[in-house]
Image: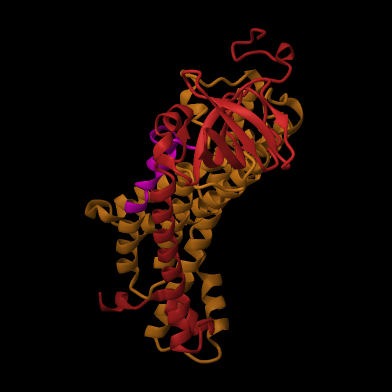
Amino acid sequence: MTLRRALRISAPITGVLLFANAILGLYITPPDKVQGNLARMLYIHPAVAWVAYLAFGVTTIGSLLYLWKATRSLRWDRIAFVSAEVGVLFTALTLITGSIWGRPAWGVWWTWDARLTSTAILLLLYLGYLALRGLPSSAETRAKRSAIVGIVSFIDVPIVHESVIWWRTLHQGPTVASLGMNSKIHGIMAWTLLLSFIAFTLLFVTLFLWRYRLALQEAERDQILVDMRKLDVTGSSTRSKVEELLSTRPVEG
Amino acid sequence: MKEMTVDPHLVADRALGLERKSRRGRRLKVYLPLALILAGLVFLVIRGLSNSLVYFHTVDEVLSMEGKLGNSSFRLEGVVVPKSVHTNNVGGVDFRVSGADGRQISVIDSANPPELFQPNLPVVLVGNLSHGIFYSNEIMVKHSASYIAAHPSRVASVGGKKI
């Protein structure tokens, strides 16, 4: 299946599920006994945070597969990079949605507890990963360097997740990971929470595919220009030459 | 292969005229974000280590180390005691918080309590202890990870049974 075709399938399904999540979360589910309508953030914030973990997990797998000689390919580096970019977006969204929820629920936009601080560290670690890729170097050196940083940065993901258990925090403990323990979530609220996880996971898939396709096109463009430099094709006609070459060499997907 | 040592992005940018003109400007564009991110990481780690590891003290802990706390500001966690909440003349509320074993501390708060502030909910207070009274200047509500419908009779549980 080509990327274009995969996108044509995943994008509309994602749209429908996100719409269903919004309808259920805003209109069908009841308000919470303590938090009232504030609890509707439950159908956005945890799923957004989950996608950030998932994205960085994909980055780690891509990085490991790049470093492993048997599977070394720039394709894995590209997968790791694209996923990190989506992960950074979702980590920022996690902090923003958490802050929006925290102000009315806790009374503060931000506090220095372990969950919030380790999430901010996670954002900076992967922003660092992306910034590091901007350093001038060959594709191989960049891929190797990024893979190491990508893997090391992932150490913060379990720290973020377990922070509410390991340390005292203002942030509540896990709801999803502790349903068999002390937390409770009622009927349709639980199902809507589950739907939000599915919808946002599909949103990740869609964004990943879209960005991966773009990264392939960028790589293709770059390669054409490198080839042109080797052939000493320079001058004011470069841009039109590139467009011509790109139109005759369709990228994957 | 020798040609792979070139940076394809730089070659592409150069060819398309997207490259920054000055070498200094290009370096700044690459290294400044990295330096800022690194500085941010150092700040967060230091702030996290000094604030997050012991984010608050419980009522029981504070009562057992009252003499050692002096006038320093710290965070106190406890459950708001029912029927103890009264508005005061400094713009906040007076109430008591209890610990796990039922021991209590009186609180005089000078800040507006958050929307969810109510009896029986745990709160984290910022302030200092003086003569057995906690003078708070910030109240944070620590709600649980449970989500119970406000009208449970209208909602079916996961198994389809009425709650």
Q: Is residue A210 visible?
A: yes
Which quarter of the picture shows residue B90? top right
Farthest top residue? Answer: B161
The residue shown at (37%, 76%) is A136
The residue shown at (36%, 55%) is A150
Along the line of sight, which residue is nearer the eye, B84 or A46? B84
Main secondary structure of the magenta stretch: helix
Work out whether B15 lies above or below A235. above
Chain letter for the red colouring in the rendering: B
Which quarter of the picture shows residue B36? bottom left
Q: Is residue A196 left or right of residue A63?
A: right
Work out whether A133 lies above or below A193. below
Q: Residue A156: image x %, image y %? A: 38, 47
Along the line of sight, which residue is nearer the eye, A142 or B47? B47
Chain letter for the orange colouring in the rendering: A
Please give the range of residues in magenta: A152-169
Farthest bottom residue? Answer: A235
Farthest left residue? Answer: A69
Q: Is residue A206 visible?
A: no
Q: Residue B42: image x %, image y %? A: 39, 60
Farthest right residue? Answer: A27
Work out whether A68 lies above or below B136. below
The residue shown at (46%, 80%) is B28
Q: Residue B123: image x %, image y %? A: 58, 32
Q: Is residue A220 left or right of residue A239?
A: left
Q: Is residue A229 magenta?
A: no
